Amino acid sequence: MVEREWREASDMRQSTLTLAAVLMVAALLRFWALDSGIPSTLGVDEPQIMARSVAMMKAGTLNPGGFFDYPGLYLYVQMAVACVRFLAGAMTGKWRTLNDVGPIDFYLWGRAVTALFGTLTVLVVYRIGLRWGSRYALLAAALMAVAPLHVRESHYVLTDVPMAFFVALTFLFSLGAHEQPTARTFAKAGAAAGLAAATKYPGAIALLMPLLALWMTAGTRPWRRAGTLATVGAAAAAFLIAAPYTILDLPGFLNGFATLAAGYAGAPPPEPGWLLYLKHLRINLHWPALLLLAAGMALAVVRIVRGPGRVRWTLAIAFPLVYYYSIASQTLIFARYLLPLTPFLCVLIAAAVVSGVSLLRRFEIPRAVRTALIAGLTVAVLFPLVMQAIGFNRLISRRGTMDAAYSWIADNLPEGSQVMGETGRLILPPAYRFSHIRQLRERPIHDYRERGVEYLIASSESYGRYLSEPHKYPREYAEYMQLFGQARELVRFTPSNEQPGPEIIILKVKP
């Protein structure tokens, strides 16, 4: 039985062209509208990475300057990309010295790196799927190529997509180590887990996969302890090489990590974390894929108990379950935290489709019917994902309210003006003295005057719910209305189908 399955997994006939098409679709969806929002509207947390990467380039140091919200690997990747971008720009006469550039000059290239990581993840998922079979592999890769959440986050300079790549790579190497159990193969899988952790701390959970594969592989019994040491040692070495200032600036790392951990241990969300993430999965997978995911997990449990392929099925569900529990236990909930699960979900959904239909052989159903059923399920799963991914790219391709506000400010407000805004996603040109506040209502108008603030930028992302439900938020409503009444409205940008985004109001602080 195992040999038959391996022959099926090794059968890559007529799949090369299909794989190429899948990768082209993956790249198209991730590179489409990659420049959206530059320079006016950047993604949440993008400036955290780009500003520090460019600052390290200008200072000629690998020290992140006490910033340890992320371990360091992706900061260094972006720093290297910024160096290449600077050299390319210098060769064309765009700038002469490092003083001529700022973080905004490197966002497009930085985003391209994230998009490349996202596209390569699709290839890794295909290689993983081959352990089940070529049809499994192509369907899993296709699902990964159009996964809406992964497509969306591949547009930004953030660590989640690169971490998902290294987690998937750890999965692939762990499967390979199980097939060829040597200290070298398990160490390679451990090193991949170390790189996942060096990209973002939760990536350390990926170390679970090579360790499980090691202890479940019969041929490793004589040297399991040595193999464990090699795997963990390779993970630690990869992490420290990729994020050296974890040790070189140990006090800074410990302080930064403690501050970061405190942010994840605040007040609990209004609903349980596991339920909120389940809703995110429903939104990004839609019901057909979500139901097939449940079937795929049930199939995995059966295969773990009965075989064959206990190791690969165990790896397919062990990391997702542990990682899901980890993020659901935190108080900060973001949909992008689900990204490392996406490769596993795609494999499980593909397994449910192909293996589920294959079970119909027991009932002597004609092959043509089974093929049609696989095709129907594939379309039912892929179609809503494709439409959602395309819809996102079309949405960000439009000129939004924040773009309009940015242009209006650049054309109408004097350079050097002191501006305060409650939207962190609107980045003003360096010519303005811009600062951010969580909500404008937090300060009275005379406080802004005393601080020398001349203009205010209000966003419906902050005030919207208070103004739409004044009976529910009477105090917040009154504070916003008082502020709006005491300042002078200069312009308002209202969202529409042609101009998406939040409503933006630009106010002048009266003398």
Image (cartoon, helix red, strand yellow):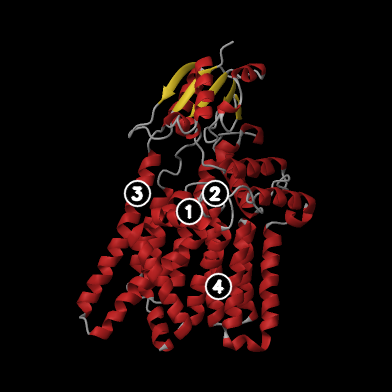
| Disc 4 target residue | 173
Asked whether the beta carbons under mark 4 and mark 2 sit within 8 Å of each other, the answer is no
| Dot placed on the residue nearer the N-terminal end, 4 or 3 | 4
- Report the side of 178 relative to 236 (left or right): left
Amino acid on which disc 2 is placed: Pro
Secondary element type, mark 3: helix
| Dot placed on the residue nearer the N-terminal end, 3 or 1 | 1
Q: Does residue 478 sit above or below 357 in this rendering?
A: above
Q: Identify the disc placed on residue 276.
A: 1
| Dot placed on the residue nearer the N-terminal end, 2 or 1 | 2
| Dot placed on the residue nearer the N-terminal end, 1 or 4 | 4
Q: Where is residue 240 in the image (x, y as percent from the top left)?
A: 71, 61
Distance of mark 4 from mark 3, alpha carbons? 32 Å
Amino acid on which disc 1 is placed: Leu
80 or 202, which lies in front?
202
Quarter of the picture containing the N terminus is bottom left
